């Protein structure tokens, strides 16, 4: 059984963020970090070499294996800032409709810059996603 390649590391989040070459992206990432830290009440931690995660929960795969995973996270990528937001909660569609300019993947929200989205809606989205993950995880215990 293959082991997850994305794991929490001891690398410095501050150093990682300070090395982002684009000032706007670096500032946006620092703002996203504050929002996610506030939502999780957990410090930022590097996951792999390029993901900044907050909090952990025990994820169980369909095949029965388990691993620790971040509750929410982001990563500055070449084209976008990728936010790892989990849907499946009641307000998800409403919040996404109010968010602004973005694109989506399975559990990823892609934004070019924070100014493209409605910041209060983004905060609500992140908070609701975090609460959804925590509630789901508690119900498995």
Image (tube, grey):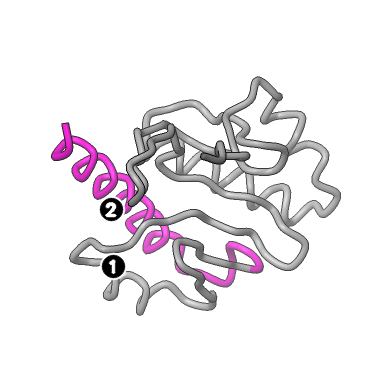
In this image, 48 relative to 95: left or right? right
Mark 2, Cα crowd under 10 Å, few <14 / some 14-19 / many 20+, is: many
Nearer to me, 66 or 58: 66
Q: Is residue 56 magenta?
A: no
**View extreme (top): residue:** 10
Q: Is residue 115 magenta?
A: yes
Query: Relative to residue 38, is residue 111 depicted above or below?
Result: below
Q: Which residue is mark 1?
A: 92
Nearer to me, 72 or 48: 48
Q: Position of residue 57 (x, y in %)?
A: 35, 34
Which residue does the image show at 41% across and 32% down from the upper left?
56
Question: Within the image, what quadrant is residue 93 found in?
Answer: bottom left
Marks 2 and 1, how far apart in space?
A: 8 Å
Nearer to me, 16 or 63: 63
* Range of magenta residues: 112-141
Q: Which residue is mark 2?
A: 128
Q: Position of residue 117 (x, y in %)?
A: 51, 69
């Amino acid at each position: 059984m293959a082991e997850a390649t994305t794991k929490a590391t001891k690398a410095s989040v501050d150093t990682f963020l300070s090395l982002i070459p684009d000032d706007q992206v670096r500032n946006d990432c620092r703002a996203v970090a504050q929002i996610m830290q506030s939502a999780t009440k957990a410090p930022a931690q590097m996951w792999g070499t390029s993901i900044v995660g907050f909090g952990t929960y025990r994820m169980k795969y369909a095949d029965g294996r388990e691993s620790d995973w971040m509750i929410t996270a982001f990563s500055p990528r070449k084209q976008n800032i990728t936010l790892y937001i989990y849907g499946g909660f009641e307000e998800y569609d409403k919040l996404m409709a109010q968010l602004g300019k973005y694109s989506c993947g399975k559990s990823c929200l892609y934004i070019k810059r924070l100014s493209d989205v409605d910041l209060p809606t983004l905060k609500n989205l992140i908070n609701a996603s975090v609460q959804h993950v925590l509630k789901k995880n508690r119900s498995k215990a």
